Amino acid sequence: MLLITTAVTTGALTLSACGSRGDTNKDGEGKTTVVIGLDAPTTGELSALGLGIRNSAQLAVDIANKTDEVKGVTFKLQALDDKALPNVGQQNATKLAGNKDVLGIVGPLNSGVAQSMQQVSKQNNLTLISPANTTPDLTQGPDWKKNKRVRQFPTYFRTATTDEVQGAFDGQYAWEKVKAKKAYVIDDQKTYGVGLASSFKDQFAKLGGKIVGTEHVSPDDRDFKAVVSKVKSAKPDLVFYGGEYPASGPLSQQLKDGGVTVPLMGGDGMYSADYIKLNKKAQGDYASSVGKPVEQLPSAKKYIADYQAAGFKEPYEAYGGSTYDSTWALIQAVKSVVEAHHGKLPDDARKQVTDAMNKVTFDGVTGKVAFDKYGDTTNTMITAYQVEKGNWAARFSAPFKEFDKS
């Protein structure tokens, strides 16, 4: 079992003052049912990541029930498919918010989808915790680059570090480890891709690298002949792509076919086994991802064994460990609220769960799980991977702020 230490401030609220929901929804064993929502793309081009997210959340719920983690509570997962579309994510958030038994939502995968869900979450005092969102705006507001950081959505949390960290890590890795001096930067015009590419450019240029060209493509593009021609003329040492694997896989192959033999590099949206399946010439390409490979973490051994024992058809992929931790954080917040009210849930359980989330801390699958004043994870570990013999091989891991010490 994971080692848990949870501290929660409940104020002077008492059970008699706030009432109790403890008898409103009981299962066959007389336990209160708490629903955890799940929003991720479980169909479509990004489903490889989404299914790993869904399965890992289900695993956390199943283990919490099996071990009776929260006395008197049975957890249930309600998983919805957002198809990686913001409007669908917003509809899913509204649907989940309408179910009084839902005390939190795990997800989504995409930062653009999260932007559409945050207001619904805030209006309904419903915790939203993502294992994968990396756009800084989500937690720190649109002026974070001007160092005017404001938490606009107190119900939003994440166990993935931001692109401020990841993009800068990529820029420094490209300069110091890949030894690239010139980079061509492409983004897919989506929230995640633009932010990641911008952070990469800033750090790479700051260190002395030259940006020899930029290009914006559509995430739906699969024919990159015009882009290949421009990149070839610029003669970069490395091409950086801000976006996701359904487009970057074909882009990389077409670059190589067109005579651009330098590696393509991207962020966690590119780090998927499907990137290699889509790209016969992926050898040597790079991607970063948040955290360390779970296979290298002693803290993840039980999670990996439990996932395999559960018999899921799909791999846990890049966000499996962080999804488990996100779900477990919600479970611990519920546990804190239930214990503070003598085994019952208060009428304002959603608000109290959100308040408890700010204080939750435990040793999770991916390491220490805790949140700062913005709702961001305190774990800024990033790993650089490179395609080698048909698989992603970890090359380097470090918290960005300690990059030069590692």
Image (cartoon, rainbow, N blue to C red):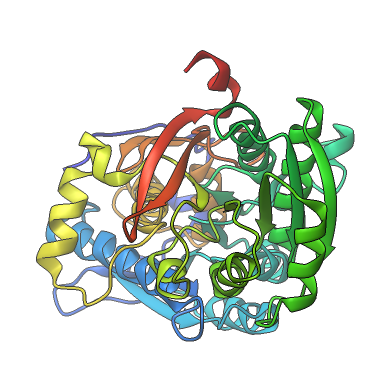
Taking the spot 72% from the left edge, 34% from the top edge, the residue there is: 181
- Horizontal and vertical percent for residue 288? 52, 46
Q: Residue furthest top?
A: 405
Q: Is residue 266 visible?
A: no
Q: Nearer the viewer, residue 107 or 185?
A: 185
As rendered, which of 19 and 397 lies closer to the eye?
397
Q: Is residue 171 left or right of residue 161?
A: right
Is 98 rendered above or below residue 183?
Answer: below
Which corner quadrant holds the N terminus?
top left
Relative image position of residue 70 (x, y in whole percent): 25, 53
Nearest to the observer: residue 126 or residue 88 = 88
Q: Is residue 5 above or below residue 111?
A: above
Residue positioned 48% across, 55% down in the render: 131
Q: Is residue 85 visible?
A: yes
Q: Which residue sits furthest left? A: 309
- In the shown orientation, is residue 309 left or right of residue 229? left
Q: Residue at x 30, y 70 (%)?
A: 55
Q: Quadrant of residue 170?
A: top right
Q: Give the image location of residue 106, x and y in percent.
A: 47, 63
Q: Is residue 274 left or right of residue 116?
A: left
| Number of numbered callouts drawn | 0
Up-down relation of residue 325 to residue 347 (above or below): above
Question: Residue 24, image x and y in percent?
Answer: 37, 75
Q: Nearer the viewer, residue 278 or 164?
A: 278
